Structures are given as structure tokens and as C-alpha cells.
Image: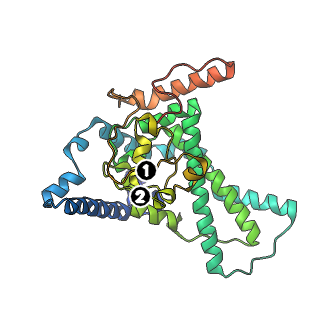
Amino acid sequence: MDGILYFPHKLARLFLTQSSGFSLTSLFAALLVAAASITWRRMQRNRPLRASTLLRGLFPAWLVRHASMHADISYFAFNVFVYGIVFGWAVMSYKFLSGIVVDGLTAAFGTMPPTSWPDLLARATITLTLFLAYELGYWLDHYLKHRVPALWELHKVHHSANVLTPLTVFRIHPLDGLIFSNILALTLGLTNGVVNYLFGKPVTLFSIDDANIILVLFVHIYVHLQHTHLWIAFTGLAGRIFLSPAHHQIHHSNNPLHFDKNLGSCLAIWDWLFGTLHVPAKEPEPLSFGVKVGEADMHSFSELAVAPVQRAAVHVVQSIRGEAAPATEAPPVSL
């Protein structure tokens, strides 16, 4: 019976819980925002809006038929149904690490008196702090993937997408995803442990389905739209605080001016602080995506799953031997 229910259970957890980051409510919210964006642009240009026009704007035929999207669907299936079975054991628990941090700080400095802060304030504080820690962990992971040649070979799978759809978020090599999960566990575990120690008692964040409520809010507003063809840009001060869909589309651009920019998830503050921010223009910029400029990228299983590991292994061996890194399709700091 468990085998029969495995696939429905996985789909239910994906679409019906907020912790998956791909819930039906967030996808519907993204659809509404996307439709509103298309409607607003057509109204500004005094162009008529028909249902068929809106449908083509949301789901253009060239995107739906593209081989890159078909590869996204394959990775979607793998990461939803297979990844947890193969790699789930290797993902560190941030709550377990948090307990180790609290025990270590208590042994080193003694017990802290329980905080006198109101419970609402304490929970709001740790919720915001953990969200900032998530954003920092996301930025750090992304920065390393763009700077370390072996890691770039794995992360390059994500950047091989020639078109962007919400499913592109699943276009992640399993080893890339494994590294990402453990870096997040480190940043979240250390932060949660330190804050709980300072509070002198366990304090729980505000969450929905065990997902930080602030992150859930961002996912419902615009995170899904970061992997789309729709240009929604935050400029000025807002563009230095929040990473709009246009920010992330620039991150995927194969224009050298955009290499290694906008490495955050929801917030631009870490990019702004560390000098990796590129604020988009208000009007759409001509962008093309993919690892190779001017060439069609391969979307086969071997190119997206096997070859990255082989190329990453070559980089590791070369590094151990102290030899020059082999040539790749693009510099390890690009895209």
C-alpha cells in the first residue's frame, strides 16, 4: 500500500503544503500577479486585452514547446520523486545542529536567564532573524557555486536553461541541491542556536507547515515569477532591498555584464552589501539565457546529470595536483 500511495503522497506534499515552496496557493498567487502585470502593460500602451491575448502572454507557445522546458519537467519529476530517496539521508537537520550550538554555548558560558521579552516580540525576532539567515545562506551557497570551478560545473545545470519557467527551480543537479541544503542547515542551525541561547529558553518562529512565514509570503508574491519571461522590475531603493523577477532574470543572462550578479533569493541586501547587485532597468532589457552564448545547449540526461559530475571531478583532481584548471564552456565565474 505504501508503494501505491508514494506518488500521490509526494504530489500532495508538494502542492498542498507551504514548506515545499511550490504550493498550489503560491502558484495561483503568481498566476494572478503575472496576469495583472500583463494587463497593466497593455493598458499603459492602450492595447486591447482579450482572454486569448492574456493566455498567450502567460503561456507562449514558443516557451511551452521548448526543449529546455521539457528538461525542466524531467528534473521536476526526479527532484520530487527520487531525490529524497537517494540523498535525503545526507541532508543535515538545522534543528539538530541548533541543539548542539545551544548545548555548546551553555557548556562554555553557562545558562542564560530566560528573556523578559513578550512572547510575540521574541517570536517575531527569531522569525526575522532566521529569514535573514536563510537569505545569507542562499547568497553564500550561490556565491561559492559561481566562484569554485568544481561547484560551478554542478550549478551550471541550472543555468543551462534556455527559457525560464517556474519549473526551472527544479532544474538543479542533485549534488548541487545537496550542498545547498547543507549550507542552509549550517546558517539556520547556527543562527537558531545562538538566538535561542541568548533568549535563555526555546523560542519558535512563526511558520506555516514548518516554513518561515516571511518566506511563505515572498513565495506567494513574486518568487515563482523570477523564473519566467515576464519583466517585473524593482528599481531605486526597492531594487536594492528586494530581488524582483527581473533581478533574477539578469542573473541568468549570458551577457558578461551580468555574470555573478544578483545571487540572493528574496532580498537584495546581501548582494548590495557584498557588491554583487545589478539593479534592473524599469523597461525590459534584451536577455538570452543558457551556458553557451549563441549556441543551443544540450538538455539530455548525460549532459544534465552525468557530465557535470565528470567535469567537477576533473577540477577536483586538477586542484589536488596543483595543475591548471582545464578549459570549460564558460569561465567558472560566469553566469
Distance CA(mark 2)–CA(mark 1): 8 Å
Could you tell me which residue is drawn at 20 percent across and 63 percent down?
A: 43
Whichever of callouts 2 and 1 sits on the residue coming sooner in the sequence is: 2
Q: Position of residue 181 (x, y in %)?
A: 57, 48
Residue 109, quarter of picture: bottom right
In depth, the one of 174 and 318 nearer the eye is 318
The residue under label 1 is: 247
Q: Could one spot residue 28 in this view of the protein? A: yes
Residue 73 left/right relative to 141: left
In depth, the one of 279 and 320 nearer the eye is 279
Q: Position of residue 16 (x, y in %)?
A: 39, 63
Location of residue 328 with respect to 146 vertically, above or below: above
Q: Give the crowd class for mark 1: few <14, some 14-19, many >=20 residues within 10 Å.
A: many
Q: Give the crowd class for mark 2: few <14, some 14-19, many >=20 residues within 10 Å.
A: many
Q: Quadrant of the N terminus?
A: bottom left
Residue 113 left/right relative to 119: right
The residue under label 2 is: 234
Could you tell me which residue is drawn at 32 percent across and 49 percent down?
A: 284
Query: Identity of the amino acid at label 2?
Result: Phe
Q: Could one spot residue 91 in this view of the protein? A: no
SS type, badge 1: helix
Query: Identity of the amino acid at label 1?
Result: His
Circle 2/circle 1 CB separation < 8 Å:
yes
In depth, the one of 143 and 261 nearer the eye is 261
SS type, badge 2: loop
Could you tell me which residue is drawn at 51 percent across and 48 percent down?
A: 277
Location of residue 174 with respect to 120 vertically, above or below: above
Could you tell me which residue is drawn at 15 percent across and 55 percent down?
A: 53
In depth, the one of 16 and 318 nearer the eye is 318
